[in-house]
Amino acid sequence: MTSRAGVRPDTVRYYERIGLLPVPARTSGAHRRYDEDVIERLRFIRGTQRLGLTLAEIADLLSVRDTGVCPCEPAETMMERHLAEIDAEMARLGELRAELTSLLSGMSGEDCADPLPGTWCPPDRAPGEGGG
């Protein structure tokens, strides 16, 4: 079952403990028995995780889905929020990249550029005195 759903057994047990999966029926030998609905639920969980949703958000979507209603509306709101977070992180990374590029371009040569607020050079050597 776990190979068909693409998850490890300990992941399945964790999802059961936190309520994402129902407690499974057991055989007389105490082995868990899962039906196709559980496998589909696991695939839903894994797919939404790949989109960056947290387990709490996934639990919210599953609770809507379990009522028989399509969770598209709440999912859309979550996806829009995650997209905005990704855009903000990309902007932050772009600024960081520009700062590092600028710093790197100033490191070659005699006038080693110091990063702010710290410096590369030891306190007794000023920038430009070689070996920045």
Image (spheres, rainbow, N blue to C red):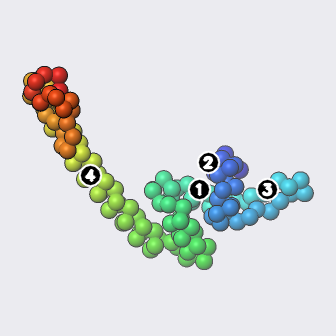
Q: Nearer the viewer, mark 1 or mark 3?
A: 3
Pick the front one: 82 or 97? 97
Q: Residue 13: x and y, percent?
A: 70, 55
Q: Residues within 10 Å of mark 4 (few under 14, many from 20)?
A: few
- Residue occupying the point 21% across, 48% down: 95
Which is nearer the N-term, disc 4 or disc 1? 1
Mark 4 lies on a secondary structure that is: helix
As drawn, the label of residue 92 is 4
Q: Earlier in the sequence, mark 4 or mark 2?
A: 2
Quarter of the C terminus within the rendering: top left
Residues at marks 3 and 2, CA–CA distance in whole angstroms: 17 Å
Q: CA distance from mark 2 to mark 1?
A: 8 Å
Counting other residues with Cα less than 10 Å from the Cα at mark 3, is it few (<14), some (14-19), or many (20 or more)? Answer: few
> Which amino acid, by three-letter code, is at mark 3?
Arg
Of all residues, the one furthest to the front in this rendering is 124
- State the SS at label 3: strand
Q: Earlier in the sequence, mark 2 or mark 1?
A: 2
Q: Does residue 65 appear anywhere in the picture?
A: no
Answer above or below: position of 107 versus 83: above
Circle 3 or circle 2, nearest the eye? 3
Q: Quadrant of residue 108?
A: top left
> Disc 3 marks which residue?
32
Classify residue 75 by image quadrant: bottom left
Amino acid type indicated by mark 1:
Arg
Task: Pick the residue in front: 113 or 125.
Answer: 125
Spatial CA span between label 4 and label 2? 34 Å
Return the x and y of residue 28 as percentages of the image width and height: 90, 57
- Secondary structure at numbered mark 1: helix
Q: CA distance from mark 3 to mark 4?
A: 46 Å
